[in-house]
């Protein structure tokens, strides 16, 4: 009897072990199936990445923002059949938060192409941007100063001090900034070359021309913002950085709140690498990145601000009104058809506005 019970117990133990082993094998089999499924999914993703390798190289999966060339390329692809039939097509690229996108344009193709890919500079980056579609000119009143001043009343019933603001009526017409690039018809089918032509050539050229127009003026905007700014030569400080701080105080006393300073890139570099009498960097950084702020002011770089000078701005009193967003037109000109060349024309219309005299000051110091 005892032997029978022992055999029964051993049988039950064996059955239990076999059950556990079976469950373990089931888990292993399930894990293998899941692993195979994951491997299949990864293989599909790798295949997709290989097929879209060109897009990765152009930065479409790296850049968070969509560049001007990306927008143009998408719009052109959607109208490619129309261009093939009519040999001409006009596309409109919506403006971003500033006059021209500051996104870089890079191209990587077989054989390699070159071109500047740095950030786009310009006085327009210091201005507020507001859309004004369908506007050929704007009329506004520019504050030029105040006559009189408030004062303590001499006696009860006596005459009060007179205060009167002065304004000048300004009519500002829209100014057009445009440029074009030539591109072969064969390259029209190469998205990388098309993107490069728009991003680098057109965007940089139009942006540079707009900077010149805003800073020093031109047809329709004589003198630019530099001529509208109040000039000042600071004699109390030798360094331009200190002169800028002096201008901030002066503008605050006049009721302004300066928040931007515009400098030539060379002048900004000169301020960042200034050293003390013991050859120590005043900025406190030798190998660090160049700062983007100067004593609380946002720094904007422009190639058209004179060396040894700085433009201190209260951006609430100046803006850039965008009449026509940056538009791109592709067409044949002259004998381009027989030469297999296309012309890509980039154009935009803007209206610069300066509402208050004194809201910009062009400063320089004794030491420069």
Image: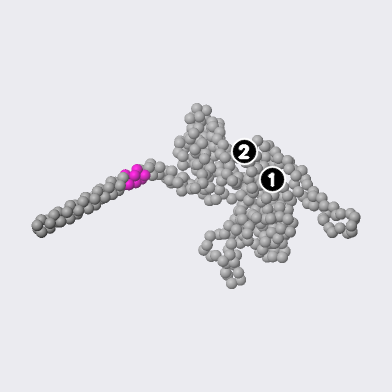
Q: Nearer the viewer, residue 113 or 37?
A: 37
Q: Residue at x 67, y 57 (%)?
A: 309
Q: Is residue 277 left or right of residue 254?
A: left
Which contiguous range is marked in magenta? Answer: 38-46
Give the numbered dot on residue 324.
2
User: Mark 1 or mark 2, which has the lower sequence index?
Assistant: 2
Relative to 89, say whether 193 is above or below: below
Q: Is residue 182 left or right of residue 218?
A: left
Badge 1 density bin: few <14, some 14–19, many ≥20, Cα 10 Å = many
Q: CA distance from mark 1 to mark 2?
A: 16 Å
Q: Position of residue 115 (x, y in %)?
A: 50, 47
Q: Residue at x 60, y 45 (%)?
A: 99
Q: Position of residue 356 (x, y in %)?
A: 73, 49
Q: Main secondary structure of the magenta part?
A: helix
Q: Residue furthest bottom?
A: 278
Determine contact: label 1, label 2, CB under 8 Å. Answer: no
- Which residue was labeled with disc 1? 353
């Amino acid at each position: 009897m005892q032997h029978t019970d022992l055999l029964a117990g051993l049988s039950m133990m064996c059955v239990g072990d076999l059950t556990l082993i079976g469950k373990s094998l089931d888990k292993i089999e399930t894990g293998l199936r899941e692993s195979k499924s994951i491997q299949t999914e990864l293989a599909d993703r790798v295949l997709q990445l290989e097929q879209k390798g060109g897009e990765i190289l152009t930065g479409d999966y790296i850049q968070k923002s969509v560049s001007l060339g990306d927008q143009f390329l998408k719009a052109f692809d959607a109208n490619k059949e129309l261009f093939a039939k009519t040999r001409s097509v006009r596309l409109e690229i919506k403006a971003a938060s500033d006059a021209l996108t500051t996104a870089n344009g890079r191209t990587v193709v077989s054989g390699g192409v070159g071109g500047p890919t740095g950030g786009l500079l310009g006085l327009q980056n210091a201005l507020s941007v507001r859309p004004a579609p369908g506007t050929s000119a704007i009329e506004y009143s520019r504050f030029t100063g105040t006559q009189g001043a408030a004062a303590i009343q001499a006696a009860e019933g006596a005459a009060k001090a007179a205060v009167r603001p002065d304004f000048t009526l300004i009519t500002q017409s829209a100014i057009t900034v445009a440029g074009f690039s030539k591109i072969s018809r064969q390259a029209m089918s190469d998205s990388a070359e098309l993107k490069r032509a728009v991003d680098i050539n057109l965007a940089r050229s139009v942006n540079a021309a707009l900077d010149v127009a805003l800073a020093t003026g031109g047809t329709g905007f004589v003198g630019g913002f530099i001529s509208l700014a109040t000039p000042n030569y600071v004699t109390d400080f030798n360094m331009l950085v200190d002169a800028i701080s002096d201008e901030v105080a002066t503008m605050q006393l006049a009721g302004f709140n300066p928040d931007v300073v515009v400098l030539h890139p060379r002048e900004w570099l000169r301020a960042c690498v200034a050293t003390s009498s013991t050859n120590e960097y005043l900025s406190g950084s030798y190998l660090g990145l160049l700062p983007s702020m100067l004593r609380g002011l946002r720094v904007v770089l422009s190639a058209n601000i004179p060396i040894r000078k700085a433009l201190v701005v209260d951006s609430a009193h100046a803006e850039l009104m965008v009449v026509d967003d940056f538009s791109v037109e592709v067409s044949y000109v002259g004998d381009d058809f027989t030469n297999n060349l296309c012309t890509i024309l980039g154009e935009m219309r803007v209206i610069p506005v300066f509402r208050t005299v004194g809201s910009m000051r062009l400063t320089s110091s004794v030491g420069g």
